[in-house]
Amino acid sequence: MANHPINGLMETAMQSIKDMVDVNTIIGDPVQTPDGFVILPISKVSFGLAAGGGEYYGDIDFSESTKGNSPLDDKLITPVKYPFAGGSGAGVCITPVAFMVVGGGDVQLLPVTSNTVAEQLVKMIPDLVNRVNNLIAQNREKKEQEEFDELNI
């Protein structure tokens, strides 16, 4: 089975994918900016592969006189020089996802797509918690001051 034609189809398709996709496709080459920042492009790579084939024996006689006989009977089949038909295909999809910016003592991940509402809400939670804490603290200080003023009257 090692010399079967489907092996050649599979090897060709896999070699083509290997030539197209490597680690530099996913994490791109770094770009140095004049102000010292380094930008790394990050992509998502998806690929698919399909291969198939079949063996055939040539023309089969399905006339009335052969009805009831096996169509694979040697007397009914015309020999073929290459009794195999097959094909393969591959596809690759490369989608930019984000840019990683490194510099100034900071690392940022900048997504290519716009943020969804849920992502924006999650990013706002720490600021909202700080504001609520500040309001509570101010309210507590105001009440303590009022109680202090009442006691000192």
Image (cartoon, helix red, strand yellow):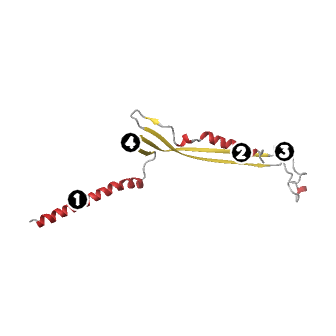
Circle 1: element type: helix
User: What is the spatial separation of the Cα atoms under label 2 and label 3, in whole angstroms?
Assistant: 19 Å
Between residue 100 and residue 64, name the one nearer to us.
Answer: 100
User: What is the spatial separation of the Cα atoms under label 2 and label 1, in whole angstroms?
Assistant: 74 Å
Sequence-wise, which precedes: disc 4 or disc 3? 3
Circle 3: element type: loop
Residue depth check, mark 2 versus mark 1: number of the one nearer the observer? 1
User: What is the spatial separation of the Cα atoms under label 2 and label 4, in whole angstroms?
Assistant: 53 Å
Q: Which residue is mark 3?
A: 80
Determine the residue positioned at 40% across, 32% down.
34
Q: Which residue is mark 1?
A: 138
Q: Which residue is mark 2?
A: 87
Sequence-wise, which precedes: disc 4 or disc 1? 4
Outermost residue on the front side: it is 105
Amino acid type, label 1: Gln
User: What is the spatial separation of the Cα atoms under label 4 and label 1, in whole angstroms?
Assistant: 34 Å
Circle 2: element type: strand
Q: Residues within 10 Å of mark 4 (few under 14, many from 20)?
A: few
Sequence-wise, which precedes: disc 2 or disc 4? 2
